[in-house]
Every structure is written in C-alpha cells, then in structure tokens.
Image (tube, grey):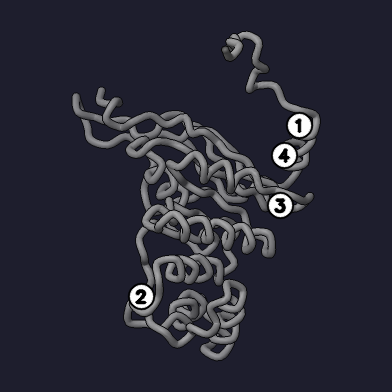
C-alpha cells in the first residue's frame, strides 16, 4: 500500500533554490522594458459594471520571456491589448522604457491568435509591409524581409500567398512580420491556440529559437499551463531568461458589481 504523504511535509512552493534565486537576481539587474503599475479595467457602468482587471502590477526586463497564465475569460486578452495600446485602461500606468503607452507604436510588436496576414500580399510583401510604412525603401525592405524568412526557414515560400501556407507557417510569418520593425517588446495573445498539438509544439520550439537569437523581450499570453511551463522555463544562458507569472486575474463573469 502506498504511503500517505502529508501536505505539511512537502516543501513550500515559495522557497527558492540558490540557483533559482541567482537566476532571478540576474534578471532583475537588467533594464526594465515594461512596467505595469496598479492597472485596472472595467466594462459597462452602474450595477452591471464588470471588473476585467484590477490592480495588476508587474515588470518585464530586457530579453525576458514572460508567460501570463489564466483561464479563458479572465482578462488576459484585455491585458495584452492595453499593453499594445489597442485598449484604454481605466486606471494605473503602463510604461515602456519609462514612456507611457497610450496608442499603438512600432516599439511594440503584436501577434494574435487568428491569422492576420494580408491575403492579397505574398509572404515576402507581408513582412515588407511594416518596414515600408516606417520609411524603408522597397529594395532595403525586401532584403530585410528575406533575412527574416531565412531565420524561420520559409525563404522558399517568399512568393507564396497566405492561403497556400499551413497554419503553423502563417504564424511563423506573422511573428517575423511583427519582429521586422525591431520592436522593444513582442506581445503574443495565445498565438498557437488554433493549431493542432504537433504543430503547436513545433511552433513553440521555433519561437524559443528566434528569442535566443535576437534582442527581444516577449510577453506571451496563454491558458495552457503546460505551454507556459515549457516556454517560461527555457532560459539557458546569462542573456535569455524566462519565467511564468500566474496572473492575478479572475473570471470576468464573477466580477459583476
């Protein structure tokens, strides 16, 4: 018969090994890229007002891979949309390298769960789009686009259209399109949620490979705890560090005042 183990005899999850403490110390010594202070967001008014986010506080440091975990409907997408400047907050502060976030900007890249490539543009021209909008000439933008496609192994599909790609390939293009403008931070809202299990695993590996090769900070939204643990426990050198934040978010349906 298996011996019963009392929870009281188990180590506290609050205790950290010396190696873990040293890892966090290295991380917190770096430049703060994103600083969220007392962030709150409500929907509706009067007796039907709903609390989506309340008093959210966290910091993200340079070259950090931060996963925010929470169940569906808890406000994760609202949070990332506020960080991207796509949604207005009701109170608190969102600072990117000390500057208030009030609207979308090229210093923040965004990858959504849905496939957001322009269907009338080729893969290469999708990646070129943001570069040209930001003032790069067509030739320079084309050269940079090809370099990004080489990074994800899709240079052979430069002249293909989105409808000719698989779901995983579309998201790889969406990631490098967001990175092409060299943002300070990449915001990802459950980008692999619509993919099958095998493709999702491959995409997670692709994302980690990209993160380790370039100077980018990532905030990754997910409801999948296994995904968060895999992605946010992948720092293996002094430059790339990661950890998961179990978001202090609650189900919006439970927050009707």
How far apart, in angstroms, are the residues tagged by discs 4 and 2? 39 Å
Residue 132 in sight from this viewpoint: yes
Q: Does residue 94 sit above or below 161 in this rendering?
A: above
Which mark's residue is nearer the viewer, 4 or 2?
2
Q: How busy is the neighbourhood of tag 2: few (under 14 within 10 Å), some, or many (20 plus)?
A: some
Return the residue at label 3. Answer: 240
Q: Quadrant of the N terminus?
A: top right
How far apart, in angstroms, are the residues tagged by discs 1 and 3? 16 Å
Q: How busy is the neighbourhood of tag 1: few (under 14 within 10 Å), some, or many (20 plus)?
A: few
Query: In the image, is 23 to the left or to the right of 128?
Result: right
> Which residue is farthest left?
47
Return the residue at label 1. Answer: 21
How far apart, in angstroms, are the residues tagged by discs 3 and 4? 12 Å
Query: Tag 1 or tag 4, which sits nearer the N-term?
Result: 1
Task: Kindly identify which numbered label has been placed on residue 118.
Answer: 2
Q: Does residue 172 sit above or below 220 in this rendering?
A: below
């Amino acid at each position: 018969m298996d011996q019963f183990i009392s929870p009281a005899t188990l180590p506290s999850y609050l205790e950290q090994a010396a190696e873990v403490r040293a890892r966090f110390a290295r991380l917190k010594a770096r430049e703060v890229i994103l600083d969220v202070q007392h962030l709150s967001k409500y929907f509706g008014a009067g007796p039907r007002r709903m609390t989506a986010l309340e008093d959210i506080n966290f910091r993200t440091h340079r070259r950090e891979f931060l996963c925010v975990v929470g169940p569906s409907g808890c406000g994760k997408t609202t949070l990332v949309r506020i960080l991207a400047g796509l949604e207005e907050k009701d109170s608190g502060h969102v600072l990117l390298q000390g500057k208030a976030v009030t609207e979308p900007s090229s210093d923040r890249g965004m990858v959504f769960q849905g496939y957001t490539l322009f269907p009338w543009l080729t893969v290469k021209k999708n990646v070129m789009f943001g570069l040209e909008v930001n003032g790069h000439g067509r030739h320079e933008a084309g050269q940079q686009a090809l370099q990004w496609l080489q990074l994800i192994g899709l240079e052979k599909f430069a002249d293909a259209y989105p409808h000719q790609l698989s779901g995983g390939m579309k998201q790889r293009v969406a990631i490098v399109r967001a990175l092409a403008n060299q943002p300070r931070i990449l915001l990802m809202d459950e980008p692999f949620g619509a993919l099958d299990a095998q493709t999702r695993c491959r995409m997670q590996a692709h994302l980690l490979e990209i993160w380790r090769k370039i100077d980018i900070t990532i905030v990754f939204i997910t409801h999948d705890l296994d995904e968060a643990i895999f992605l946010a426990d992948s720092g293996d050198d002094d430059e790339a560090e990661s950890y998961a934040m179990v978001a202090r978010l609650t189900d919006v349906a439970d927050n009707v005042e």
